[in-house]
Amino acid sequence: MPRILIVGGSDAGISAALRMRELDVSVEVTVLLRDAYPNFSICGLPFLIGGQVSDPARLAHRGLDALQAAGLEILPCHCAIGVDAASRTLEVINPDGQTQMFPWDRLLLATGARPVCPSLPGIDQLGVFPLRSMRDGLRLQGYLELRQSRRAVIVGGGYLGLEMAEALSSRGMEVTLLERNPSLLSTVHPSLGRRVEEELGRRGVRVLTGVTVKGIDDGAGALRVLGDPELAVQSDLVLLAVGVSPESELARRCRLPVGAAGALVVNRRMETPVAGIWAAGDGVETYHRLLDRNVYLPLGTTAHHQGRIAGENIVGGDRLFAGSLGTQVIKVFDQVIARTGLRAEEALAEGLPAITIPFRSPAHKSYLPWAGELHIRLTGDSRDGRLLGAQMLGPFPQEVSKRLDVLATALFHGMTIEALSDLDLSYTPPLSSPWDPIQMAGQEWGRAVSAGSKGA
Ligand SMILES: Cc1cc2nc3c(=O)[nH]c(=O)nc-3n(C[C@H](O)[C@H](O)[C@H](O)COP(=O)(O)OP(=O)(O)OC[C@H]3O[C@@H](n4cnc5c(N)ncnc54)[C@H](O)[C@@H]3O)c2cc1C
């Protein structure tokens, strides 16, 4: 019976392990992870910090008992430090601090990503936090409780920065969010980023865009964040949310090739170029379905998909990763913002003649009083009308993400924008219209492009 080792006990590693045991109960699967939190939802950390989740244990997708009941051997606090592909052994520091060698026949690297920590003066001070792992989250929570912190500065206006702005202000803190770009959420059109900024402003979060952080001073019992153009903000804590990079150190040590953003090179079966070694999750390149090439696009959804594919193939399956479209959604106070596929600029950079038409519509029949407004941006190929991407913003909880998911499904299947009108979508006045807003947006795209619009 082949001995299967998995390094990494989060989304990708556990998805793979469960899939292997689902397909073949005879396989022995050991999962090593360097932290003490197998199969936890780190995506839930903002909700733990914000107080909506009271007990960190509730963030576990599955408890240790459930993982063991599925037939997995789980070894927390085991840090892999070396892989020898020739002798098929993994070198590990165990919880007693001793080096232990683990033999393997098949190895999956699912080591995820680490937070980017910019090399700025003062970045190592007490009170400056990244947020990536359960350990980071618990450290941050402990600090907030111990220090009774009142003021926070968040560096970075991507999805993590925005979720944490809501979380920290839900705790009654004064939050300042600093973003280097002219608008928040660089993954969507600036007009939508500005709406998110307005929402944050309405909720008392101070947002400063176009600001580059230069360093952090220790100023009279508080931290002082310095930025350019001239800026100095006093704070009790600073949260760094400026992105992640692949945790590929282990792989580099055994000379596995890295590609986009330093992520491991894998094929669509999630195999590395070294026989017997697979890799999945935030540490690896992601095949992009529209671009038909690998990119770095770390997401929890993708980590689950890739893990499942790797798991299936490791036990003898032959499945290809279908590819990512970069579909993602985030809720910021009462607004939800989602995207899938390519923005016009991204498509144009790929040589695709893309046109984006913005469209606004009530989320459902407007004779019912609570209809919020949806902002939809459809991007299509001007030659054949093929859908290339979509972005949507609207009030929570009005079906933004599921509508966007319909568009992601259309994109996955290569549909044209015109064909959206052929979809048989559900309707009742409190939830939609006979033509769903995404179909109306598609009809508007067709009219505008026929009338010669170059988009907006
Ligand atoms: C606050 C937050 C919110 C998020 N929200 C969303 C969201 O809403 N939607 C979404 O799609 N994504 C979200 N993400 C991203 C998502 O959590 C990640 O894409 C996903 O967790 C990646 O899973 P992974 O298994 O590849 O890696 P990770 O979760 O990074 O796990 C890596 C695993 O490898 C282990 N490991 C690493 N190195 C070693 C070593 N040398 N030896 C042993 N073990 C090792 C770690 O202990 C860990 O178990 C969020 C992330 C954060 C931090």
Image (cartoon, rainbow, N blue to C red):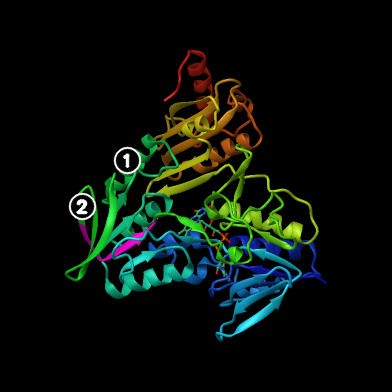
Label 2: few (<14), some (14–19) or many (≥20) C-alpha neighbours in 10 Å: some
Q: In the picture, which quadrant includes the N terminus?
A: bottom right
Q: What is the magenta range?
A: 233-241
Q: Position of residue 47 (x, y in %)?
A: 43, 61
- Write the residue at 56% across / 31% down: 388
**What main secondary structure does the magenta stretch of the protein show?**
strand
Disc with the residue nearer the chain's start (1 vs 2): 1
Q: Is residue 18 visible?
A: yes
Disc 1 within 8 angstroms of ligand 1 (CB)? no
Q: Amino acid at mark 1?
A: Pro
Is 130 placed left or right of 80 in the picture?
A: left
| Labelled disc at residue 46 | none
Residue found at the very far left of the displayed protein: 220
Q: Which of the pair 276/199 is nearer the observer?
A: 276
As displayed, is residue 6 above or below residue 214? below
Q: Amino acid at mark 2?
A: Leu
- Write the residue at 50% across / 26% down: 441
**Is residue 67 a member of the stretch shown in magenta?**
no
Residue found at the very far top of the displayed protein: 451
Residues at marks 1 and 2, CA–CA distance in whole angstroms:
16 Å
Q: Which residue is mark 1?
A: 182
As displayed, is residue 148 above or below residue 447? below
Q: Which residue is mark 2?
A: 231
Q: Secondary structure at mark 2?
A: strand
